[in-house]
Amino acid sequence: MKSGMEAKGLMDEEKIKQLIKAALPHYSDYLDTHGGVVFHYTLEALETRLLEELDRMLDGSEADAASVAQAAKIVRQANEVMKASADSAVAA
């Protein structure tokens, strides 16, 4: 996430970590241990998860309560990341 120019302060690392954990709960311990320096290693898993969900939607598969709850959590976390990012852009 930090390539090129120094990105410190542009994104809240903790909020991004919570977002990734919401989408990929099995990465929780890994993220807790290594922090933001490993975010880029989750990109392929995030892409795969997204594509799987899109396939399910296109197939017309019904979502169970757990899937809906997880989706709601992901959306909430994404909104928090976007708000924090917008707030830090305004402050800069």
Image: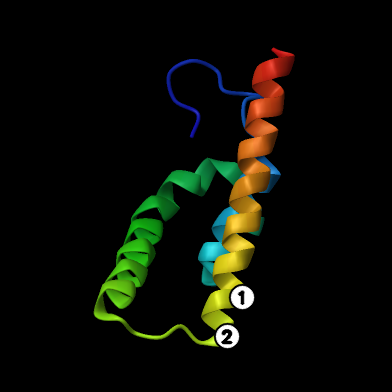
* Left or right, 76 with reference to 64: right
Q: How many numbered circles does the render carry?
A: 2
Task: From this view, report whether residue 39 is shown above or below residue 67.
Answer: above
Mark 2: few/some/many CA within 10 Å (<14, 14-19, 20+): few
Position of residue 71 in the picture relative to residue 84 (left or right): left
The amino acid pointed to by label 1 is: Ala
Residue at 61% x, 38% y: name it. Answer: 82
Residue 78 tag number: none
Q: Position of residue 53 (x, y in %)?
A: 36, 70
CB under 8 Å between discs 2 and 1: yes
Residue, disc 1: 69
Tag 1: Cα neighbours inside 10 Å, few (<14), some, or many (≥20)? few
Q: Which residue is mark 2?
A: 65
> Is 66 placed left or right of 63 in the picture?
right
Which image quadrant is residue 20 in? bottom right
User: Percent position (x, y) of residue 8?
Assistant: 63, 24
- Res. 56 in view: yes
Note whether residue 29 is visible. Answer: no
Q: Tell me: residue 27, above or below residue 37.
A: below
Q: Secondary structure at mark 1?
A: helix
Residue 92, horizontal then vertical, whole percent: 69, 12
Q: Residue at x 38, y 61 (%)?
A: 45
Residue name at image x 39 percent, y 51 percent: 43
Residue 84 pos. (x, y %)? 69, 35
Q: Residue furthest top?
A: 92
Which quadrant of the figure has residue 73? bottom right
Q: Is residue 82 above or below residue 87?
A: below
- In this view, the residue farthest toward the front is 60
Q: Which residue is pictured at 34% across the width and 55% down the height?
A: 44
Q: Nearer the viewer, residue 51 or 68?
A: 68
Determine the CA span between mark 2 and mark 1.
6 Å
